[in-house]
Image (spheres, grey):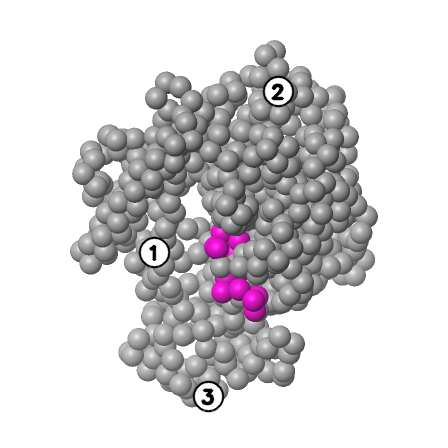
């Protein structure tokens, strides 16, 4: 260790960034753990400045969604490897200010607690602040949850911790059910195995938005060390365990997502194969499908919680490969529908059997559009919506989600509210709609029966028919204020059951929607840039679109440019859309594309949209098939152009 200062000084001349050196020194000057000191010394002795830069070039930013980063480094030091652990896990998480580890979990929780206590004092809460904690099956998730609970209780708040790994949307539900002031979910969603994260929710059950977001970020940034002084024992909070009673309450609400239980009962022949992709989903999905009466089978190999996600290349139900085992099982037992959820059970991917007997994958845009169309149509058929209250019906989607959902809203006379990417904005709308109900009628709103909340929303405020985003996230009611794969599983199984009752496959039902409203197709692509150098490349590329916007794309003139970072934009309800680093280009031929850096991954994302509308009447099946080919070709050409243009911009 005595050579470390000299080695770091030498490293600064050989590739160690100035910011990395500053952050290493700051960590060592605090109360570092032995494993942290040993790991830094090991990497410095090896002259691995690239790995040290990736770990220390910045302090992991606590953004509006919390934290996300690597909990296992590209290089695992001997100190981190430590004693042998289950599933080939290192004994200790990755050392670094830019990593998910005990250092950053402690800092984040200290900052959150400081904000929560100040807010509770202003609001004059009649009890100690409570913070609800859930976690998934990833490396170190339980350890991070336990550390967060320790910081919370020793700092004077109560910690309500799930006894076992549970879904993200159940955490949102539990925050509301328990009257918690905030919530923490330890998860990295569908990211690769080396990642983990820390998502923060507030008392409405939604991920934090302004003004809470900036307030929490300021408090976290003010914390410079993982070390803190616990309060005297008499002033500390309590740790409580959330068990099966919360599961049961959540399942009771999820059952009400199904609009027509009689239809489901009549279509008991529908066979479903489900996979949680080694995550937490089976804890809710399987009992839910059983309650609803569906014939469901789980992929046995993928029921096993496993941080390595060993049976898939990526635990992301957006990717066809992740559904391979489920589709194989569906072919074996003749199932009509395959559904898979990501490790924290907030996203759902789908494959359905077509008329030729083959399993066909649906995109997130298509799944959401089918849910929106079915639920809007059935709500009118069942008398939930009618001519008198249709103005209160709302479909919520993100700007980068298909315009087919906007067409669905227009077809049924509903509002379509567009938000920025992130379900926290969907949750903010749900909070607004709840607060639109007179105060005396919405007392204890989270505990009112679902039928009663639906009545109140329709009579006094707004009813969300469906909320969704293109990246396979959906919500179908307001009892959970985050995307909810469990609700989506129940809702989409009902869609397929309905199509079956009408003598259609799910694919044919989608084509019916296309025939009525137009063929809308999309393509999503990303360019990945890892590490410190990659972050700079992403920033440079994103800035180039603002500084040098193209005047044409793929031979079509750009007729509109919306820069969400600088333009003043309002949604259809008159609410100001927050600033974000996203630009949307609209072309003269009707195509659109959006460009935005990811907020959680080292990517810059591209969203491409194409459409061919009906010729003044419902299209025939043959016309839909031909239009699909034309629109898909136009979308593919636009990506080819964008990709080539991005390479030129990157080298400029």
For marks 3 and 2, the one nearer the N-term is 3
Q: Position of residue 569 (x, y in %)?
A: 38, 29
Task: Say which residue appears at 42% left-offset and 22% top-offset.
Answer: 618
How much space separates mark 3 and mark 2, taking CA atoms? 75 Å
Q: Is 310 part of what is drawn in magenta? A: yes
Residue reaching furthest front? Answer: 356
> Which quadrant holds residue 3?
bottom left
Does residue 567 appear anywhere in the picture? no
Q: Which residue is mark 3?
A: 2
**Circle 2 Cα neighbour tier, 10 Å, few/some/many (<14 / 14–19 / ≥20):** some
Task: Say which residue appears at 46% left-offset and 83% top-offset.
Answer: 41
Could you tell me which secondary element the residue under label 1 belongs to? strand
For marks 2 and 1, the one nearer the N-term is 2
How much space separates mark 2 and mark 1, taking CA atoms? 43 Å
**Residue 527: assigned label:** 1
Do the residues bearing badges 2 and 1 touch, measured as CB atoms within 8 Å? Answer: no
Q: Which segment did they paint magenta?
A: 309-320
**Residue 380: assigned label:** 2
Which is the main secondary structure of the residues drawn in magenta?
loop
Could you tell me which secondary element the residue under label 3 belongs to? loop
| Front position among marks 1 and 3 | 1
Residue reaching furthest bottom? Answer: 2
Does residue 69 appear anywhere in the picture? yes
């Amino acid at each position: 260790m005595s050579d470390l200062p000299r080695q770091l000084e030498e490293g600064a001349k050989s590739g160690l960034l100035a910011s990395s050196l500053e952050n290493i020194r700051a960590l060592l000057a605090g109360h570092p753990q032995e494993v942290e000191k040993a790991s830094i010394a090991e990497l410095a002795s090896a002259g691995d400045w690239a790995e040290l830069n990736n770990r220390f070039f910045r302090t992991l930013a606590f953004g509006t969604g919390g934290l996300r980063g690597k909990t296992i480094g590209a290089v695992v030091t001997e100190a981190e490897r430590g004693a042998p652990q289950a599933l080939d896990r290192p004994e200790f998480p990755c050392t670094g200010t830019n990593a998910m580890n005990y250092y950053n979990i402690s800092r984040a929780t200290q900052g959150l607690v400081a904000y929560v206590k100040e807010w509770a004092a202003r609001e004059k809460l009649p009890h100690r602040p409570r913070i609800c904690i859930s976690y998934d099956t990833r490396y170190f998730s339980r350890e991070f949850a336990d550390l967060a609970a320790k910081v919370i209780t020793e700092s004077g708040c109560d910690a309500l911790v799930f006894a076992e790994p549970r879904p993200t949307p159940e955490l949102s539900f539990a925050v509301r059910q328990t009257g918690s002031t905030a919530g923490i979910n330890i998860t990295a969603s569908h990211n690769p195995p080396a990642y983990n994260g820390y998502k923060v929710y507030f008392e409405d059950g939604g991920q934090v938005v302004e003004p809470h977001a900036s307030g929490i970020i300021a408090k976290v940034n003010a914390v410079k060390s993982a070390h803190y002084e616990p309060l005297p024992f008499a002033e500390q909070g309590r740790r409580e365990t959330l068990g099966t009673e919360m599961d049961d309450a959540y399942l009771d609400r999820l059952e009400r997502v199904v609009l027509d239980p009689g239809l489901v009962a009549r279509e008991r022949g529908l066979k479903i194969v489900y996979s949680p992709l080694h995550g937490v989903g089976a804890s809710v999905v399987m009992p839910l499908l059983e309650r609803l009466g569906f014939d469901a089978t789980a992929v046995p190999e993928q029921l096993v919680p496993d941080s390595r996600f060993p049976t898939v290349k990526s635990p992301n139900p957006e990717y066809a490969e992740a559904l391979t085992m489920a589709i194989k099982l569906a072919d074996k037992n003749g199932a009509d529908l395959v559904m898979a959820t990501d490790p924290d059970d907030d996203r759902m991917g789908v494959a359905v059997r077509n008329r030729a007997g083959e399993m066909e994958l649906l995109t997130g845009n298509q799944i959401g559009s089918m849910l929106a169309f079915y639920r809007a149509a059935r709500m009118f058929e069942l008398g939930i919506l009618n001519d008198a209250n249709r103005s209160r019906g709302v479909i919520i989607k993100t700007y980068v989600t298909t315009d087919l959902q906007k067409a669905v809203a227009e077809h049924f006379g509903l509002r379509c509210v567009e938000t920025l990417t992130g379900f926290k904005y969907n949750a903010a709308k749900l909070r607004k709609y709840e607060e639109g109900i007179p105060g005396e009628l919405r007392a204890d709103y989270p505990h009112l029966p679902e039928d009663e909340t639906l009545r109140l929303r329709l009579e006094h405020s707004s009813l969300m028919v469906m909320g969704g985003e293109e990246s396979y996230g959906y919500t179908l009611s307001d009892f959970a204020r985050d995307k909810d794969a469990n609700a989506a599983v129940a809702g989409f199984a009902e869609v397929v059951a309905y199509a079956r009752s009408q003598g259609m496959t799910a694919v044919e039902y989608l084509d019916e929607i296309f025939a009525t409203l137009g063929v809308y197709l999309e393509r999503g692509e990303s360019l990945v840039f890892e590490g410190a150098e990659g972050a700079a490349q992403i920033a440079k590329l994103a800035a180039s679109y603002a500084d040098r916007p193209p005047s044409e794309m793929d031979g079509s003139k750009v007729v509109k440019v919306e820069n969400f970072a600088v333009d003043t934009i309002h949604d259809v309800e008159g609410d100001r859309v927050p600033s974000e680093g996203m630009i949307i280009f609209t072309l003269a031929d009707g195509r659109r594309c959006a460009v935005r850096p990811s907020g959680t991954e080292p990517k810059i994302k591209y969203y491409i949209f194409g459409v061919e509308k009906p010729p003044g009447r419902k299209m025939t099946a043959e016309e839909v098939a031909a239009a699909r080919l034309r629109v898909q070709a136009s979308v593919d050409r636009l990506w080819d152009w964008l990709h080539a243009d991005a390479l030129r911009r990157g080298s400029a």
